[in-house]
Image (spheres, rainbow, N blue to C red):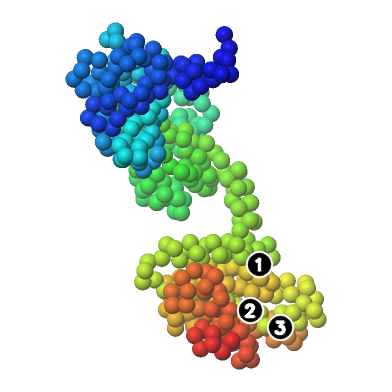
Amino acid sequence: MPIQPQKLSIENIVNHLGGGIFCCKNDDVLTVYYASKSFYDMIGYKENEITAFCGNEANYVISREQHINWKKLSIILKKRGFVELELKLKKKNGHHIWTSCFLRLMTMKDGSNYFCGILEDITKKRRCLKMERKQLETIKRAKQELAVNEERYRIIMEQVADPIFDYNFQTQEFYCSPPFKKCFGSEGSIDGLLDKLYHSNVIHNDDRSRIINDIYLFINGMQSICPEYRFKDATKDYRWYRIKGRLIRAENGIPLRVIAFITDIDKEKRERLRLKERAERDLLSGLYNHVTTTNIINKTIEESDKDSQHALLLIDIDNFKYVNDNLGHLLGDELIEKISYKLKKQFRDGDIIGRIGGDEFVVFLKNIKEKDAAHRAEIVQEIFNNTNLNEKNDFKVSGSMGISIYPRDGDNYHALLKKADIAMYAAKKKGKDAYCIYSDLMQSEE
């Protein structure tokens, strides 16, 4: 029968939905201040038969198996506003039910505190979850029994197209599937394999430390973020592979065996790297573009030790507009390519080189002293002076440079770039084909 509009109250709504509302004092026994009819129906009592939720009275409601620190809970409620917890309640007939309780704390004008809650009977849900857990345990035991049957297990392994290896921690036995042997060869035992992982070039040098760390995480129950590595295959070439491992443990948590599925992803990985490279690089020069340069330098600064010192070189090709306007854009592009190639050849692998504008370059020199940075600037000058624009060599190529020092001149890329820009224009005022190291005097003269 539908509820009449005039009877549409909170009490009617709660009773219709089958939940329960209660309000009790924040005292030692949780004295009942109010409880809805649907609450009493839920636990089988009549209205006003319950005076307190806890205590020594016969009609206590909250199961004595539950030990809840209500004082501590009230502190949490004051900070968070609400909590959701499960309460085990004793019905009048002696049976217990589980409820989900959405609880708030209400403070009255006189300073007294009341717990206000909404209850939902979740006893059936918990029973279903318990049954599901039992079913999962049954499935788990069945899988373990299947793994014990080695002959059947090996047959399944050999039908899989991807390379697979399996190591038994208890017996120290190592098994590799036929595709594994075909891909990587089969010489050596598990000891030989581990020796290759740690000491040989089976794993690409750039991936070796990462895979060792990932193995440690895997054994300790943590998943690697990117389990993709380069391995040398039977043809002696490095290819990209994705590793998907499964660790089987005993009930006490001790590892029993590890099974690894190896998938060749070389083609798709190289394509992803190629696209990433194009997104990060300037197409003409092959150097990092402005966005990538900014991100990498800022990340390097963030990861630097407090005593680190770096240098930022801002390089500008002198009279580049004249080249484009009078000698043509093709020669201008050729000049950019030549300078970029020579910069890459000159600096260290760890240094960051980027093209941030039409004729502007940035070089970030890590862990370098100021006098050494000045020496590198002199080398850059030689690069410009030894670059020919055409066969006639009738155009002198030169560059102006500004240098700023981290952390003296700034603690981020943009601050260092601004100071290096001021120093670069000071070099241009000196007649170009020069470099200047930033000082505060330049700032005041600008």
Circle 2 sits in a helix, a strand or a loop, which is it?
strand
Please report whichever mark, 3 or 1, sits nearer to the chain's N-terminal start: 1
Q: Nearer the viewer, residue 129 or 40?
A: 40
- The 10 Å Cα crowd at callout 3, few under 14, some 14 to 19, many 20 or more, is some
For disc 3, the marked residue is 319
What's the residue at 44%, 48% (across, down)? Answer: 203
Q: Quadrant of the N terminus?
A: top right
Q: At x 52% / y 73%, what residue is drawn? A: 415
Q: Tag count in the figure?
A: 3
Labels 3 and 1 touching (C-beta < 8 A): no
**Residue 127, image quadrant:** top left
Q: Is residue 111 above or below residue 320?
A: above
Label 1 and label 2: CA atoms lie apart by 14 Å
Give the residue type at disc 2. Asp
Decide: marks 1, 2 in contact (CB < 8 A)? no
Residue at 51% x, 83% y: name it. Answer: 438
Mark 2 lies on residue: 316
Circle 3 sits in a helix, a strand or a loop, which is it? loop
Q: Nearer the viewer, residue 185 or 98?
A: 98
Amino acid identity at mark 3:
Asn
User: Could one spot residue 379 in this view of the protein?
Assistant: no
Position in image of residue 123 (x %, y %): 38, 16
Residue 349 higher or lower than 135, as above or below:
below
Considering the image in quadrants, where does the C terminus appear?
bottom right
Q: Which residue is mark 1?
A: 285
Horizontal placement of 1 versus 323: left or right? Answer: left
Horizontal side of 30 relative to 130 (left or right) equals left
The picture places residue 47, in percent across and down from the top left corner, at 35, 14
Q: Which amino acid does the dot numbered 1 rest on?
A: Ser
Give the camera-side residue of 4 and 342. Answer: 4
